[in-house]
Each structure stands twice: as structure tokens, then as C-alpha cells.
Amino acid sequence: MKNILLMISSEKDRDLISKYLGNKHTVLIADNSDDKENTIIDDTSFDILITDIQSLSVQRGRVKSLKECSSPFRVPVLLTGVSKKNKYEIDFFKDIVDEVLFFPLSSAELNIRLESLFRIINLQKKAVVDPLTGVFRREHIVKRGREELSRMKRSSKKTSFGLIMLDIDYFKEINDSYGHHEGDKVLKEFSLRMQRCLREYDIIGRYGGEEFLILLPDTDEEGTKRAAERLQNEIISEPFYINNNEIALSASFGITSCDEPDEKIQDFIKQADNALYEAKNNGRNQIVLDKCTLKKFD
């Protein structure tokens, strides 16, 4: 079931589309859709936006920004309120709109357009999500880092975000002893444990084979340290199991925080990666911040 946001100026059309959607999807209604101060579309908790020309004309800037920075996927936009005789009306929105629902409105036509948008969503998911672990691919996590820097630059207040680079210690031994199939199971469980102790809006990606990168929005150096400690405790607090055998795992962490939006994301990733390298060289199973060991578990 998808969350669909309706930003329709006509109450009649809004009610009709809601009726057509029925119970197959969760319908969200944008309040005061003709209000320039409307901020509901800044919330990316919906999967598809259905809007009309009048509302989109007012909210064009916000919708364009939403599509450029929406997370984790580019939100598809379905435009309605267009007559086939006046197709030229959509030219101004062709860089925003993914599908057009022409008048007169019909349930069949709506379902056809939605199916097309669902395909877009599925293709996006395949492009950005690592199929094994269910977290983001390397390319997308780096892209999200750039977006976070862009968001910081636009913000009127001073903010920062944390980066955690972590690597499972001695993971090659698991693959060598039990095979890659069992190693893949461990990676899946490892990813689930990390997601359990992160916030809903934290961003996690698989950066390499058993290496992960985590972005922590609105998090300073101290908050990044605490997040890394939670992750480390989550990993070592209980064993992993392979063929009913208990396997004790640990991880090495390199962390940094970013409060300079004019810098490049790769520079901050390199800082975290250098700290990770030091953690591994110093005996693993520890957290290192820019050459300063914060915590080590014996």
C-alpha cells in the first residue's frame, strides 16, 4: 500500500480521486493547497504526489526541490486537471511531471497512470538499494551526503552532520570457514542490527563488501560518538549464529563530523576512512575520531 498525497485545488476533484483510490492506498490531503506557505509537500513520507495545474503553479518551487532532494527516492508527480485540447499547459511543468491524468477523470485511467508511477518507484529502488543488505548502494549514500551538505548550505542556522565508516572485523574468516552463502546471511543480520539502533532519518549504505557508511543528519561530534558506541554495543551484545554455531563479531569504526557545507563530501568520507584505517591498525574493535581513540572494547 502506497501513501499518496493529493494537492488538488478543487474539492470535487479531490473527493473523486480519493473515491477512485478507495482502500488500495493511504490518501493524504494537503491542507490549503493554494497557500504558498503550505509545507506538507516538504515531508517525504508519501510515495506519489497527485496535483493539478493551479496548485502546482503555486507550489512549483517546492515540488521541484522535493523531486531533487527527496529521500530515498525521487517522488513521482502525477498532474491532473488538464484537458487534451490544452496539452500545451503541461509544457511549463515537463521537468517536474512524470505522468498526466487528462480530463475527464476516470478510475481506469487513474490506475493506468499509477501503475506507470509504481514502475518508476520499483526501478528507482533497484538502482539505489543494495539487494543483499537492503541498505543503500555506495553511489546513493555518497549522493545523499552531497544533498546533506546542500541542505546545510541552505539552512539559516548553523548545523552539522556526522559520518561513521565501519568495517566488520575479520569477516574474511567467516567466508573462508562457512562459505559466502552463510557470510551473506551474517551481512543481512548485521545490517538489521545497525538499522535497529539508528534514528528513522539516519542514512546507511553499504560502501564496500563488509564496509558501511552512515550519515547522521543534525548530529555533532559528540552525538556521532554516541551513535557509534550504540552500534558497537549492538554488534557485540549478542552473538551471531551460523548453522547453530555462535559467532562473536566486532567492528572497527572511523568517525568524523561535518559543519562546513562548502567542503566536498568525499573529503569528509576520507577523514572517516582514515580514522577507520587507524582503528583497524590499532587492534580493531574500537572507535577512532581523526586519530584520537575514543573507546576500545577488550
Image (cartoon, rainbow, N blue to C red):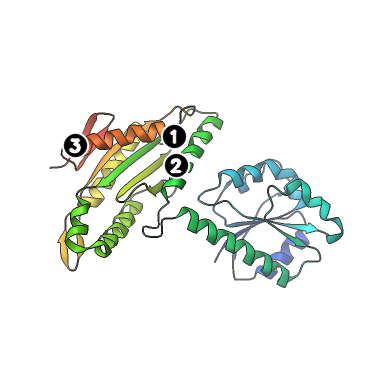
> Quadrant location of residue 35?
top right
Residue type, numbered disc 1: Ile
The location of residue 121, given as percent across then percent down, is 56, 59
- What is the crowding at mark 1: few (fewer than 14 residues within 10 Å), some, or many (at least 20)? some
Q: Whole-Å distance between the Cαs marked 3 and 1?
A: 24 Å
Res 8 seen here? yes
| First of labels 3, 2 by sequence position | 2
Which residue appears farthest toward the right when viewing the image? Answer: 85
Q: Are marks 1 and 2 in contact (CB under 8 Å)?
A: yes
**Residue 293 numbered mark, or none:** none
> Quadrant location of residue 86?
bottom right
- What is the crowding at mark 2: few (fewer than 14 residues within 10 Å), some, or many (at least 20)? some
Mark 3 — residue? 281
At 19% from the left edge and 63% from the top edge, which residue is drawn? 178
- What is the crowding at mark 3: few (fewer than 14 residues within 10 Å), some, or many (at least 20)? few
Mark 2 — residue? 142
| First of labels 3, 1 by sequence position | 1
Q: Secondary structure at mark 2?
A: helix
Against 207, residue 82 (above or below) is below
The location of residue 184, given as percent across then percent down, is 29, 61
The location of residue 81, given as percent across then percent down, is 78, 58
Quarter occupied by the C terminus? top left
Left or right of residue 101, residue 135 in this image: left
Q: In terms of depth relative to the viewer, which is nearer, 59 or 127?
A: 127
Q: Whole-Å distance between the Cαs marked 3 and 2?
A: 25 Å
Mark 1 — residue? 265
